[in-house]
Image: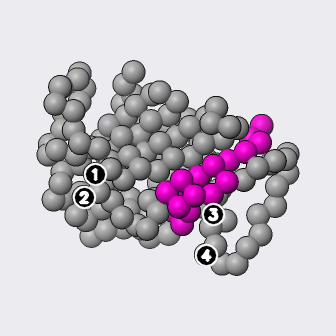
Amino acid sequence: MLRSLKIENFCCFQSFELQQLGRLNLLVGMNNSGKTSILEAIQLLVSQSNLTRLVNGMISRGEYVLDRNSLDIRNLFYGHKLSVGSKLSISGNNSSKIITISVEEKDTERRDHEIFEGSEKLVFSNNHQFTSVPLSPQRYLDSGFLRGKEFLGLGTKTHF
């Protein structure tokens, strides 16, 4: 059972913490105050790398860039800014479960099943499991989007 939740740089929360969660919790607040973001953070934390519901939520809100095949991932980060060094994290139960998504420089060594175009990548980590998605500097960082199938692919290539 989830007893605590800590969110950093995710959606509208720069830093947010919920303590003493019970079996039943009621989220109340004004429109656009972050209730859905809290639920999406919990969902991302417990989904263990499955981003399908998060992506579906982004699609239902129309968070596109250019066309319906491109999702604007800047909306996942606090302040809607995406650059090398951008990082968000969600943790629960005193950090026993941690999800981190960050934009980092590409490693110089090439690993099996990793081919990158450009010098940046999006790194998704889930309790020491890492997944990388290529980010082309001009196409992705400037516009802040990933093609739908690449974004959905975050949970499919896991490296230890």
Magenta-tinted stretch: 1-17
Q: Which residue is mark 3?
A: 36
- Kindly give the residue lying farthest to the bottom in the view shown: 30
> Where residue 9 sits in the image (x, y, percent)?
49, 57
Instruction: Determine the image quadrant of residue 16.
Output: bottom right
Q: Give, as a three-letter code, the residue at label 3.
A: Thr
Work out whether 2 lies above or below 64: above
Front-most of residues 152 and 41 = 41
Q: Give, as a three-letter code, the residue at label 4.
A: Asn
Q: Which residue is mark 2?
A: 141
For image coordinates 47% across by 42% down, the residue present is 100
Q: Are marks 1 and 2 in contact (CB under 8 Å)?
A: yes
Q: Give, as a three-letter code, the residue at label 2.
A: Leu
Q: Earlier in the sequence, mark 4 or mark 1?
A: 4
Tell me the element at label 4. Answer: loop
Q: Are marks 2 and 3 in contact (CB under 8 Å)?
A: no
Q: Which residue is mark 4?
A: 32
Tell me the element at label 1. Answer: loop
Mark 2–mark 3 Cα distance, whole angstroms, equals: 26 Å
Q: Which residue is mark 1?
A: 84
Tell me the element at label 2. Answer: helix
> Where residue 119 sits in the image (x, y, percent)?
16, 44
